[in-house]
Image: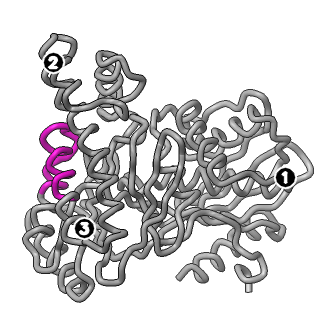
Amino acid sequence: MQEHRLQQLHEDFKRCFEQEPSVCVRAPGRVNLIGEHTDYNDGFCLPMAIDKDVLIYAAPRDDDQVRVYSQQTEETAQFTLSNAIEKSEEVSWSDYIKGCAQILIEEGVSLKGCDLALTGNVPLGSGLSSSAALEVAVIHAFLQICDQSCADDKIAVLAQRAENNYVGMNCGILDQLSSACCQAGQAMLMDCRSLHLDQAPLPDSVSIVIADTGKRRGLVDSAYNERREQCEAGAAALGVSHLRDATMHGLYQAKQDGKIDALTLQRCEHIVAENGRTQAAAACLRANDMEALGQLMDQSHADLRDKFEVTCVELDDMVRIARSLPGCLGSRMTGAGFGGCTVSLVESNAVDEFVKALEDAYKKIHDLPVAVYVTGAAAGAGPISLASSVS
């Protein structure tokens, strides 16, 4: 499948730019098993990279122009490398590429003009980090064109800055760090304060099933930033920099003292509990206790629905159906919410029947383009051998 995508992209690159590429890179999307909205609270997350990704071919130019072809939109964008790269109102997807260039320039990287052709099969707006995969892949491509290298976690931080400071989405580090640093066959316990990463193996006895509800949301215009502000208000009321350092006792005391209102308490309760659940989930993986992991996923979804209020009817229905099916050990929404995907932990010997039953049952109640698929834990971003990619 990837070989076919690479071949098609290679042909498009030559057609668009009339030269051969000299660089090929990929960066995966991710699914977060547990640990939602904890990243920007300096907390813990447990993501894994998925087998859907962004692929880029690139070649240097002898000027300061960057030309980009998107296979998905069949559009081409162009901009000039400068100290202040302007956004585009007509070709909004190009802002992610421009943002990466801008951040690298601010970081002191001497960028070269280049031609880029890209494609991706991470569903857009699904909560599987299509934008982070694009950003991480673009930074890898720019660095390779300049014959420079950078640590994977640093690439993730630069990609996050591009989305925060240029695109305008105030996201945490979860998505970019997952795309850049995950390992094949492993989930990754991520400490979003120290960026310390611990791998946790996924046993063969269970499968990870992602169900795309077909409900889309635009994060920049959603309640995401509002939730972040509520968390920051709660942390400030407790006198801590982030909710990572908060306790349930401290929250209830702050509410009793009139420092936070009932709604802020709800938001903060989810974060404090979710940090504990996420660390426990990694321990469950290492102990091969899949039933306990499933229970933690169920608890996470209930809090996201009732306390953080970032689910929707479609997400709740998908989770409810999944939990009613044989072999499902746990299910929850994944991503920022308001639409997108769920992730379910399913016994491997039941996964085929589970996938069909989940899709069929959901289609009966929602007229949306649902997609359900099983994913392995993929490797993080990096180069692809040019010889093998164009053979």
- The mark found on residue 317 in the picture is none
Q: Earlier in the sequence, mark 3 or mark 1?
A: 1
The amino acid on which the numbered mark 3 sits, given as a three-letter code, is: Ser
Q: Is residue 219 above or below residue 298?
A: above
Residue 256 quadrant:
top left
Q: Residue 309 colored magenta?
A: yes
- The mark found on residue 344 in the picture is 3
Q: Residue 310 colored magenta?
A: yes
Residue at left 57%, top 30%?
Answer: 165
Q: How many marks?
A: 3
How crowded pointer 2 is (Cα within 10 Å; few <14, some 14-19, many 20+) is rated as some
Residue at left 63%, top 57%?
Answer: 137
Residue pointed to by mark 1: 146
Q: Nearer the viewer, mark 3 or mark 2?
A: 2
Residue pointed to by mark 2: 255
The amino acid on which the numbered mark 2 sits, given as a three-letter code, is: Lys
Q: Is residue 129 above or below residue 345?
A: above
Secondary structure beneath dot 3 equals strand
